[in-house]
Image (cartoon, helix red, strand yellow):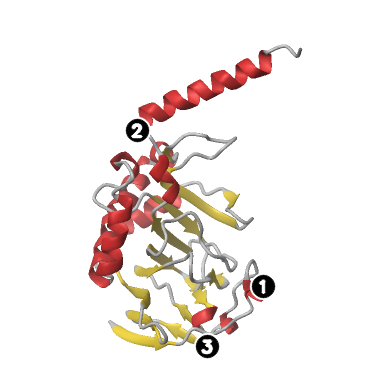
Amino acid sequence: MIDIVLKKREIDFQAFVKRSAKEEDCTQIIREPSRIIDQDTGEVVVIYGQVSRESQELFRALRTVKYPVTERTGGLKTTSRIFGAMPRIALRSDFCRMAGLAKDSPQANALLLKWGLEAEKLYAEHSPERYARHKGLTEKVLGEYRMVNTVFTSGIVNKNNPLKYHFDSGNFEDVFSCMIGFKEGIVGGYLAMPEYNCMLEIANYSVSLFDGQKILHGVTPMTKLDESANRFTIVFYSLKQLWNCKPMGEELARIRKLKTERERKRLKPAV
């Protein structure tokens, strides 16, 4: 793994946020295992490498999953599927729970959790100080909301997503998310980071570690070379709101009580 020192440049965020990423936005494509170091702070801000093993089994399982088109915070449309723990969402699903993938596609869900362990190893190896801080923060989240033996609580699988420029939200501060890429028969789909004037190739079996809440990022257009071509990225992260979750039994009791109280208010005659 080589070190690449880059100077963070001033950009007009309004000109980038929520617009499509383009290859011409950045002049450098990073294709080999690298650590990107901020020239001014000396801090490692991005790690790009390769996972140590292949998994055609997971690739096949991901092809069988249904991926709805949804909107993330800020209106960012994605073709994706959530897995792992989910926090309370007021007026919609106001209780802490596990995402539906475990029930809908148990094989894919189990394989994703195994790859969470792979992501954990890479994180601990290449950014030990940040990893230790991350571990200390997430130890405050109940174990049933964390992926076993990892610092991660949750994840998302993106399928062929040319995501517009955005910042992530909702994670613990100053920690890395970990993205593993699977790509076959796809040209393009680079991860662009215009502030550092560079793009990560996101090759097959690549891994990318960075703080998506601090670094603006987006995915450049991709071209399929054949009908079976796909680009999946699996992002592992830790949601701060899960700090507030009670044991799942208590969460269910809480939402039942809330629903009963709401129904009583609806039925109460007006005075």
Q: Quick check: 77 left or right of 101?
A: right
Name the kind of residue labelled 2 in the image: Pro
Considering only vertical position in the picture, is 270 above or below 11?
A: above
The disc, 3 or 1, on the residue closer to the chain's N-terminal end is: 1
Counting other residues with Cα less than 10 Å from the Cα at mark 2, is it few (<14), some (14-19), or many (20 or more)? Answer: few
Which residue corresponds to the image point at 36% horizontal and 40% vertical from the top-left? Answer: 106
Which residue corresponds to the image point at 38% horizontal and 69% vertical from the top-left? Answer: 208
Name the one closer to the observer, 28 or 182. 28
Name the kind of residue labelled 3 in the image: Thr
Residue 14: numbered disc = 1
**In the figure, residue 143 lies in which quadrant?**
top left
Counting other residues with Cα less than 10 Å from the Cα at mark 1, is it few (<14), some (14-19), or many (20 or more)? Answer: few
Considering only vertical position in the picture, is 260 above or below 32?
A: above
Counting other residues with Cα less than 10 Å from the Cα at mark 3, is it few (<14), some (14-19), or many (20 or more)? Answer: few
Kindly indicate whether the residue at mark 2 contacts the one at mark 1 (C-beta within 8 angstroms).
no
Element assignment for label 1: helix
Task: Tell me the residue that label 2 is attached to.
Answer: 247
